[in-house]
Image (cartoon, helix red, strand yellow):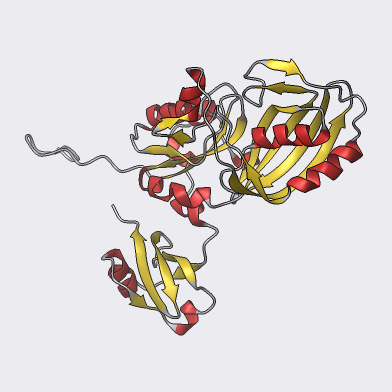
Amino acid sequence: MTGVAPTGAPAAPARMISGILPLDKPAGLTSFGAVREVRRIFGERRVGHAGTLDPQAGGLLPLCLGRATRLVDYFHAQPKTYRCAVRLGETSDTFDTEGTIVRSGDAGEISAEQVSEVLRRFVGDVMQVPPMHSAVRHEGRHLYELARSGREVERRPRAVVIHSAELVDFRPGPVAEAELLVSSGKGAYMRVLAADLGVALGTGGLLGWLIRTKYGTLVIESALSLDAVEQLDDPRAALLPIDVAVAHLPRVDVAASASAQIRRGQSVWLPRSTASGAQGETRAHGPSGDLIAIGEQTGALFRPTKVMVG
């Protein structure tokens, strides 16, 4: 009978699922909850998210499946863009609406011009103290675990980069709302930015809501909800190639012979026409266009450091 394995023959191994899922995470779902749902939909155990979104936050959450989980750290190196609202005149112990909210001042005299002027102080290299309600670890435990048990520990300020911060809307009042568009680097907390902005304005502040709209080359307009992914005849159609995670790195294309060497972890000399322009950390693609390795390029020598096989 055609297409049926002989009795006792081992079943063919299931095809590995690999790719990047640009998920539009709804507010109210944890990032790990999103990972759990995607594992169920795809039947793939190896799923990881690229950068936690707080439960009350929504928007773009890139999920890496299969081999793409090896590239999560490369996502972290790429800038992210958020649209968020800062409520001036209120504070909370979590720096957002999830905590205990108290009135901290009257923002009725604050103008949009003042907010824009003070906001400029937070662009560039800035220091942030991680909030207690965060996934940062202290002596092996997450800070949010300590916070839930009633403990508060000293946290060292961390250097982060805010690439840009723009006031896009302002609603005045005793509790004013400043809507911001912020682009940041790795490790920046919008909750801390909201609280620090409130302190600088003398009113106190907290994060009202947040949506991540861009992450590297991915944009929210191309992201899919969990329901949309589940309704696809084949959910794999929603996956982007794994090289999306390293799209910010220079690309070199190699011939079949060099591709075979790289797949074995061997360094190769690149033709002058291929090598020109790319130096340092580089991504190598084989003749079919697939990502085969990340490596270091020095002159015309490419040395693979992470081979994407299996």
Q: How many marks?
A: 0
Rendered view: 260 above or below 223: below
Q: Quadrant of residue 54?
A: top right
Q: Is residue 299 left or right of residue 216?
A: left
Q: Quadrant of residue 178?
A: top right
Residue furthest bottom as drawn? 272
Residue 235 in the image: state x and y as whole percent. Answer: 44, 35
Q: Is residue 101 left or right of residue 138?
A: right
Tell me what residue is drawn at x 22 percent, y 41 percent: 13
Residue 128 in the image: state x and y as whole percent. Answer: 63, 41
Pick the residue in front: 210 or 287.
210
Tell me what residue is drawn at x 79 percent, y 43 percent: 119
Q: Is residue 85 left or right of residue 63?
A: right
Pick the residue in front: 133 or 277.
133
Residue furthest left as drawn? 8
Pick the residue in front: 60 or 88.
88
